[in-house]
Amino acid sequence: MSDRSQTTGSLDEEGGGQEPDALRRKLLKLAGAAVALTLAPGVTVLARDLVVKGSGGHKTPVRYGLLIDANACKSGCESCVRACQDYNGLSHDPGPDNAQWIRKVTIVNPKTGFSRSFPVMCQHCENAACVDVCPTGASFRRPDGIVLVDKHRCIGCRYCLMACPYKARSFVARNVSDQKPWAPRGKGTAEGCTMCVERVEAGKPPACVAACNRAGHKAMVFGNLHDPKSAIALRLSEVATTTIRADLGLGPSVHYRGI
Amino acid sequence: MRIRAGLWAVLAVAVALSGVWAAHRGRVALPVVARAPGHCVLNTAQMRRTHMMLLRTVREDIVRRDARDTRFRLTHCVACHVQRTASGRFIPVNAPGQFCASCHAYVGVRLDCFDCHAAVPHHAGAGQAAGSALVAAFRMPRALRASKGAGPGGGP
Ligand code: SF4
Ligand code: SF4
C-alpha cells in the first residue's frame, strides 16, 4: 500500500472549486477503487463502476455441484449435519422451528428391506422453483449455480418454503444472536444451504463434505460439474447416478449414487 | 438606569438560552465514539455521509454479483470498531453507547444491520490490533484522506 500512499495530489472533502468531471478523473487516477465522491455537502455521487469486481464473470463456465454416494454414507452418522450447524451457526436442537439446511434421510423398500441413508440439502436447481416463485427477487441463482437467498430483499413470505419440492428452505421465526460473520441470518427471512459459499470462494469444499471426509466415509464429492477434469465430473462419468425427483425437471446440482 | 436594565435583559436572555442549550444537550446525549486504531478506508467526513451507501453498494456486489473481493466489508468495520470490556470480552457494536449504536441513537435512525450480521468479530484474537492490520491492508491512499489523523471515531 505504501506506493499508493505516495501518490501526490490532494482532494478536499467537499471537492471545492473543481469541476466534477475533473474531480472524478482525479479520484479515478488516485484511488482506482474509490467509491464515494462528495460534490457538495450532502450531494454525493457513488462511482458505482469503480467497486472492485471479484470472481464474477468466470472465464470458464462453472457450476458447482455435489455427488453423494449413498453406498458410502453411514446410517446413523450425522457428521455432515453437525458440521453444517457448527459452521453456519445453527442450533443442534431439532426443535420445531429450527433451521435444517441439511438433513439425513433414510429410505426403505418395505418389500425387500433395502435401506439407504443419505444427506439431503438444497439441490441448487438449474430451474429453481424457489427462484420462480419469489416475488422480490430475493431467491436467486448465481452464475456459478449456487442458489441463495438475498436476505436484504427477502420479505419472509415463505413462498419458497412451499414451492421447493426438496423442503430445503427454512424460515427464521425468532430473533437470532451470535451469528457467524460469514453466515448472516435473522428473523423474518428464508434461508437454506448456501453450499458454504464463503468456503467455496476461498477454494475449500463445503463444511459437510470436509466433515464426511474427516469421518472417513468419503461419501460426498464437491466440484465444478462443467470442468470435465474435475473429480466430480470424472466420477459422474464412471458410475451410475441419479438426482432426486428428476421427473420434476428442476435440474438439481446434487447427484446421488446408490438410491 | 436604562443601561442597567439593558444589561439585566441581556443576562436574562443568556441564562434562558443556556438553559435551553443545556436541556438540549441533556435530552439527546452526544455520541461517544471511541477512536479506532489506524485509518479507515475512507476519511471521516466521507464515512459519516456515505457509509450507508457504501454498505448498500457493496452488499449488492458481494451477495448478488459474486464479487466478494471488495475492500469494503461490514466485517472489517466491526473488527476495527469493536470495543472490549475490562475483562477483554467483545462488546457488540450495536450495544448502547457503542460505535454504531451511539451515533444511530443520536440521529434517531434505526440500526438493523446486526439483526442478521455478527456484531462482534469471530476470532478472540481479532478486534483492535487485527482490525487495524486489516484496515492497513485495505486503507485508502493518504492523498485521498481529507485530514491526516482524522481516522474513524473523531467525534461529530
Ligand atoms: S432445492 Fe429447493 S431451495 Fe434449493 S434450488 Fe431447488 S427449489 Fe430452490
Ligand atoms: S420467503 Fe423470501 S426468499 Fe422466499 S419467496 Fe418469499 S421473499 Fe423470496
Image (spheres, coloured by chain):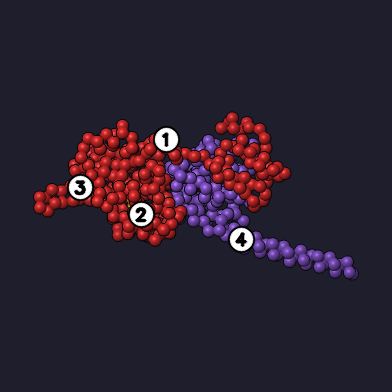
Chain colours: A red, B purple
Q: Distance between the Cα atoms at labels 2 and 4?
A: 46 Å
Q: Residue at x 32, y 57 (%)?
A: A163
Q: Which quadrant holds residue A167?
A: bottom left
Q: Which chain is mark 2 on?
A: A
User: Going by the image, does B144 lie left or right of A200?
Assistant: right
- Density class for disc 3 (Cα within 10 Å; few <14, some 14-19, many ≥20) is many
- Density class for disc 1 (Cα within 10 Å; few <14, some 14-19, many ≥20) is few
Query: Which residue is identified by label 3?
Result: A117
Marks 2 and 4 in Cβ contact (< 8 Å): no
Q: Amino acid at mark 2?
A: Cys
Q: Distance between the Cα atoms at labels 4 and 1?
A: 54 Å
Q: Which chain is mark 1 on?
A: A
Q: Distance between the Cα atoms at labels 1 and 2?
A: 27 Å
Query: Which residue is identified by label 4?
Result: B28
Badge 1 marks a residue whose secondary structure is loop
Q: Amino acid at mark 3?
A: Ser
